[in-house]
Amino acid sequence: MNWRVRVVHTTGYRYAAPVTQSYNEARLTPRSNRWQNLVVGSVVTTPATRSYRYTDYWGTEVTAFDLHAPHTELKIVSSSVVETGDAGAPVNGVSWAELRSSDVIDRYAEYLEWTQYVPRDRELAAVARELRKGRRPVDAVLAVSEWVHDKLTYQRGTTGVHSSAVDAWQTREGVCQDYAHLTLLMLRSIGIPSRYVSGYLHTKPDAGIGETVSGESHAWIAAWTGGWWGFDPTNDIEVGPRHIWVAIGRDYGDVSPVKGTYSGGAATAIEVSVEVTRLA
């Protein structure tokens, strides 16, 4: 099944005092890969500024821009049209012995390492090892994702943008970012290379053509079991045409939608919205 989807992501900031220098990076443009095709995409700012694009180390398209005229508000609007499709079935192409080989470990070392958001944890590693028993790597990914889905309660406000997988586990609550981080921690602890994926989720599977719905920024994981494939532990579903891929990395720190530095008053987010329209 293929969809054509328009995504409009708006982010706005207001500053307590005029900002005179501002340097920013936006990771808001959906990627073209074997699961989807970017038809058109743009990132527009108010105040207007010149921008340039580059592809970062992880393969994500970045729009970089800076502002030097005094301003008290900043608005960033990313608009894109994407053709999406089924991500395909989970890949069963590697054994546990092959995952432990030096070739695989060397090639995917960065997706096996511990980070601020995905730290080592003995308790969760022990659970992952139990879930691994008697299962192939591909089935272990599904078992871990289902376990995370069942053990966490989706709840906004109990974790923050800087919370780690362990923080979410301690509260037993979190949002999609936390579900993804917790799944990554457990998969990496049993030697399965895994990525953090950020993007968008069409929230209404039965939406009609031309109907605009309130979408949301979303996060899921991609695992390597002989090939990369995606899974959404928050919803316990395979990644499909409702998922729009934007950025990949080791964790949220590699894919933050907007980040930068500026000189001026304290900033407050005044507008964050995602509108998703199925065009075909």
Image (cartoon, grey):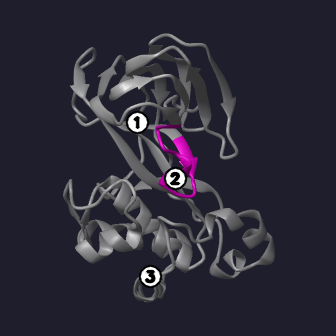
Image mark for residue 241:
1
Q: How far apart are marks 3 and 1 (CA)?
A: 29 Å
- The residue that label 3 is drawn on is 128
Distance from disc 2 to disc 1, alpha carbons, whole Å, reads 26 Å
Residue beneath disc 2: 253
Q: Residue furthest right?
A: 103
63 up-or-down from 97: above or below: above
Mark 2 or 1: in front is 2
Q: Report the magenta residues as a range.
A: 247-260
- Nearer the viewer's eye, disc 3 or disc 1? 3
> Is 139 on the left-hand or right-hand side of 214?
right
Image spot of residue 279 (x, y percent): 35, 16
- The residues tagged by marks 2 and 3 sit, at their Cα atoms, a distance apart of 24 Å
Mark 2 or 3 closer to N-term? 3
Taking the spot 59% from the left edge, 26% from the top edge, the residue there is 63
Where residue 220 appears, as percent x and y from the top left, is: 42, 53
Type of amino acid under label 1: Pro
Tell me if 99 is positioned left or right of 238 in this view.
right
